[in-house]
Image (cartoon, rainbow, N blue to C red):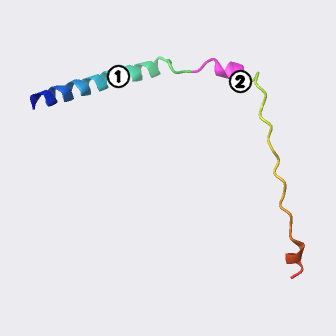
Amino acid sequence: MSVIYILLAVSVTVAIVFFIAFIVAVKRGQYDDSYTPSVRMLFEDELVKVKKPKKINTNQLKD
């Protein structure tokens, strides 16, 4: 039964270490993307499809 407590303590410690490492990496700008904004203007914009208006049923207007 004491092995479960040891494993629980070790797993919580490892999780905290990985969380701290993640926070430090984010603060230092590890995940900042500096390449994509400079290249984005080289790609063509996607064409926007224009929706056609729905046809009006003239039979309903006569009523």
Residue with the mark numbered 2: 40
Identify the residue under disc 1. 18
Question: Residue 39 lies in what quarter of the image?
Answer: top right
Residue name at image x 86 percent, y 71 percent: 57
How far across and how far down the image is residue 29, in percent? 50, 18
Residue 42 placement, left or right of 31? right
Mark 2 vs 1: CB contact within 8 A: no
Query: Which residue occupies 61% across, 18% down?
Result: 34
Q: Position of residue 24 (x, y in %)?
A: 41, 19
Q: Which residues are magenta?
A: 33-39
The percent coordinates of residue 58 (x first, y second) are 89, 73
Q: CA distance from mark 2 to mark 1?
A: 33 Å
Q: Amino acid at mark 2?
A: Arg
* Relative height, residue 4 to residue 42 (above, below): below
Q: Residues within 10 Å of mark 2 (few under 14, many from 20)?
A: few
Q: Which element is circle 2 on?
A: helix
Q: Tell me the quarter of the image containing the N terminus.
A: top left
Q: Is residue 48 above or below residue 31?
A: below
Give, as a three-letter code, the residue at label 1: Phe
Specify the farthest residue to the bottom: 63
Relative to 13, say whether 53 is above or below.
below
Q: Give the position of the C terminus as an image quadrant.
A: bottom right
Picture residue at 46% right of the left edge, 22% below the top: 26
62 part of magenta stretch: no
Name which residue lies at 64% across and 17% down.
Answer: 35
Q: Nearer the viewer, residue 34 or 3?
A: 3
Residue 38 placement: quadrant: top right
Residue 17, quarter of the rendered image: top left
